[in-house]
Image: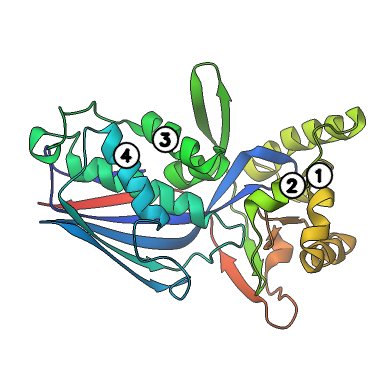
Amino acid sequence: MNEVTTAGPVSQVSVAVPATSANLGPGFDALGLALARYDHVTVRRTAGGLQVSVVGEGAEVLPLDGRHLVVRALRCAFDRLGGQPAGLAVHCRNSIPQGRGLGSSAAAIVAGVIAARALTGGCGPAQCPNGPPGPAMDDAGVLALGTELEGHPDNVAACLFGGFTLAWGDADGTHAVRLPVAEVTVTALVPPFEASTAAVRCLIPASVPHRDATVNAARAALLVEALGRRPELLFEATVDRLHQSYRAPAMPASAELMAQLRARGIPAVISGAGPTVLVLGPHAVGLAGPAGWRAFALEVDTVGATVTARE
């Protein structure tokens, strides 16, 4: 990510966070790809209260109070950094479709956490009236808190760092690395309906056949090579037997479209928890979904979240 800030607390920050696609077929809860479509969030310290405004995607349905996910992430981050400011004004200009499997929740969480970090400048006493200054939060801390709030690290890592990422957790916490990514065309085919990540996760069984796990392990490794250096391997590298078929009953139109595209040899996958269908590679150019669907031709974002601050 790119951050431009001052040495101490500031009064206002502007954050840009990219859309992301996770899983990419076989890389369940591990692989993520940042996409050049952005939500822009401005957060300003005020004398008191909370003001929330939203324009663009989700403006008609997102809450304009403390339930908004950006605000919830801000609050959690301020607590980690030492305490809450007196008041906040939050303005969101969204272009990431909400609830469509393009990382809108991860974008909101990352935006809130890094905005809080920039506003506090590491949290000085003037910004921590409810307690002593907390420790500075590095990018590893942002990833850890973002994963805690999101529940899994794949979208959070890609949103924070940009590019093609691999994320995992162990006894020491959550980790992520950026992987090489070749020039690859991406089209997101976005339906007019949403899918609940929590609901579709419940459809995945607690165990899968060993042969299916073996296929996914091999394809996930192949996907690293395909996206990094050999896009001609993307069709075979996006084979999945771990999650997409189990989730199909929750999004039959998306599953059918993906199947139709793959029958034509086109590397199509369900983006994240769906219902967006993501198409990778040269076949993505000029594709369109069924009536009522939107098609976004996207580049890979290579920067990740960006922050600018003003005293």
> What type is the residue that disc 2 sits on?
Gly
Residue 257, position in %: x, y? 81, 67
Q: Nearer the viewer, residue 309 or 281?
A: 309
For marks 3 and 4 on the same chain, the one whose residue lies earlier in the sequence: 4
80, 29: nearer the viewer: 80
Q: Pointer 4: what residue?
A: 77
Dot 2 crowding, Cα within 10 Å, few <14, some 14–19, many 20+:
many
Q: Is residue 231 left or right of residue 300?
A: right
Which circle, 2 or 3, is nearer the viewer? 3
**Residue corresponding to mark 2:** 25
The residues bearing labels 1 and 4 have C-alpha atoms spaced at a distance of 36 Å
**Upstream in the sequence, badge 3 or badge 1?**
3
- Name the amino acid type tagged 3: Leu
Mark 2 and mark 4 in contact? Answer it, CB < 8 Å: no
Label for residue 240?
A: 1
In the image: residue 205, left or right of residue 112: right
Residue displayed at 34% across by 53% down: 71
Which sits earlier in the primary sequence, circle 2 or circle 1?
A: 2
Q: Secondary structure at mark 4?
A: helix
Instruction: Evaluate if marks 3 and 4 touch, with contact meaning CB atoms under 8 Å apart.
Output: yes
Quarter of the figure that contains the N terminus: top left
Q: CA distance from mark 3 to mark 4?
A: 8 Å
